[in-house]
Amino acid sequence: MSRPLRVVVADDHAAVRAGVTAVLAADAGIEVVGEAADGRAAILQARALRPDVVLMDVRMPRADGIEATAAVVAEGVAVLVLTTYDVDEHVDGALAAGASGYLLKTAEPGEIVAGVRRVAAGEGVLAPEVTRRVLERLRHAAPAAPARADAEVLLAPLTAREREVLAGLGEGLSNAQLAARLGITEPTAKSHVSRILAKLDAPSRMRAAVVARDAGLV
């Protein structure tokens, strides 16, 4: 039997932390190993406890969620943002910092649990309220020439198949959807994604999607 997923919940409101912790603890496959009331504490807990996922609020004292996300991702720990705010500035900042997902606190308990599981599995997750806006910006924002050139340099080590997978990431496809599109198994799709992230030195699928956009793959 596999061990439970280890999660740290970071939010400056004690009631919110208690509620989220209760939601996660109700799932036998998830263990909340720590709580943090500010961004600095979230960073320290990630370093000390080595969780699979940190569930991170955006607005917190000492270090905000975006700053904390960058530091936690640098420690090799995945971050799923869970916040009240769906403004583009926060979404873009969190994804640029390496967050693997962005959910709103209005999400149903099952959506939060599923989001934690997907992020722990190396996939990305976005709240339905922000998905269309994010993908539209990825598809239609016109990158500057230097950005496109830089992206092409990054893509040079990728195989033709990996470029196809990267294009799918740019469209927000899950591993299952990538597998269906390309006629491969889901584990194979996951392996392709892992190799792509390593070659691009990208902290998350979301960051790889930005590279795909900059390179004109989507």
Image (cartoon, rainbow, N blue to C red):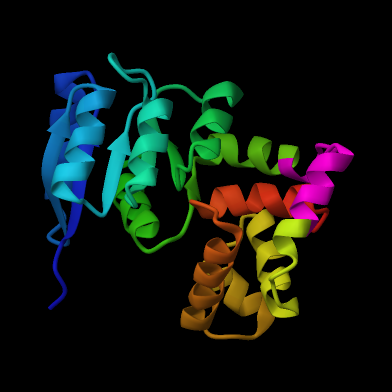
What residue is shown at x 21% (from left), y 51% (from top)? Answer: 51
Picture quadrant of residue 200:
bottom right
What residue is shown at x 32% (from left), y 45% (from top)? Answer: 112
Indicate the position of residue 181 as horizontal and vertical percent values.
67, 76
Magenta segment, prevailing SS (helix, strand or loop): helix
Relative to residue 109, is residue 15 depicted above or below?
A: above
Picture quadrant of residue 66:
top left
- Front one among 139 and 94: 94
Badge count: 0
Relative to residue 60, is residue 162 depicted above or below?
A: below
What residue is shown at x 78% (from left), y 45% (from top)? Answer: 139
**Residue that protrudes farthest toward the top in the picture:** 61
Residue 28 in the figure: left or right of residue 134 = left
Residue 109 seen in this snapshot: no
Q: Quadrant of the N terminus?
A: bottom left
Relative to residue 187, is residue 65 depicted above or below?
A: above
Residue 76 seen in this snapshot: yes
Indicate the position of residue 13 as horizontal and vertical percent values.
20, 18
Residue 32 shown in magenta: no
Residue 41 in the figure: left or right of residue 153 = left
What residue is shown at x 23% (from left), y 21% (from top)? Answer: 38
Indicate the position of residue 77 as horizontal and vertical percent values.
32, 50
Indicate the position of residue 148 as horizontal and vertical percent values.
82, 47
Residue 209 in the figure: left or right of residue 43 = right
Q: Which residues are magenta?
A: 138-152
- Front one among 158 and 85: 158
Q: Quadrant of the C terminus?
A: bottom right
**Residue that protrudes farthest toward the right in the picture:** 145
